[in-house]
Image (tube, rainbow, N blue to C red):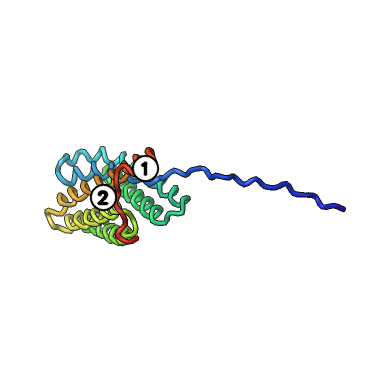
Amino acid sequence: MASATKPALTVPTTLPKIANPAPLGLAAFGLTTVVLSCINAGLLPPEATSAVVPLAFAFGGLAQLITGVLEYANGNTFGTVAFTSYGSFWLWYASLVWSVGAGWLKPPAAVGVAIVLLMWGIFSLYMWICTFKANKCIFATFLALSATFFLLAAGDFGWAPGKQLGGFAGLVTAVIALYVSFAEVLNSTFGKEVLPLGRPLIG
């Protein structure tokens, strides 16, 4: 008895182009960080915090978590860890402010917040070490972010200038992140390098 012949499988000649999710996460991180850093730097009154909380939930938190999942699908370990982590940071911040404001939690001791910020500084520092293989703008973003967390932690530990200096460092961080987001969208749209990002320190 003759065996049945299986039909040949058609292999697509080209795979669909996959979008780069990183500019979304960088925009979410940068924009939210600008607003909060303006408050920390004294450029906006503390009452403006109520505008940061929903922004941190919807954009700084949710959009970065989505970006982290998409980076996972792309096989990007660094992007997955970075965007998921900092998205979670914004959700933590918004949840804390919301819960305290609603009276569900007592305001935390400053030293407790300082320890949290210190740990985020350490996390950002070891992520910065990984950016030696990334472009120089990402390298600068994580370097400035590490400084931001350490300064804010110092402020909550009792060093008076720490919060304001951390606010200005946060603004520097956010501006670089937004530049990277803009450059990656622009370069992708035009199909060429319009805005430079800088070669990695380690090739």
Per the image, label 2 sits on a secondary structure element best described as: loop
Tell me if I can see residue 99 in this picture: no
Q: Residue visible at 30% across and 61% down?
A: 129
Compared to residue 189, the image places residue 70 above or below, namely below
Considering only order in the chain, which callout, 2 or 1, is on the residue closer to the N terminus?
Answer: 2
Q: Which residue is mark 2?
A: 106
- Where is residue 168? Give x, y as percent: 17, 48
Q: Which mark is residue 37?
A: none
Count of residue discs:
2
Q: Horizontally, is 23 left or right of 13 in the view?
A: left
- Where is residue 121? Give x, y as percent: 26, 58
Q: Nearer the viewer, residue 104 or 37?
A: 37
Say what amino acid the circle numbered 1 marks.
Lys
Furthest toward the left, the residue is 160
Give the number of the mark in front: 1 or 2.
1
Residue 132 occupies quadrant: bottom left
Compared to residue 150, the image places residue 21 above or below, namely above
- Where is residue 93? Give x, y as percent: 29, 48
Say what amino acid the circle numbered 2 marks.
Lys
Q: Which residue is mark 1?
A: 192
Q: Nearer the viewer, residue 111 or 44?
A: 44
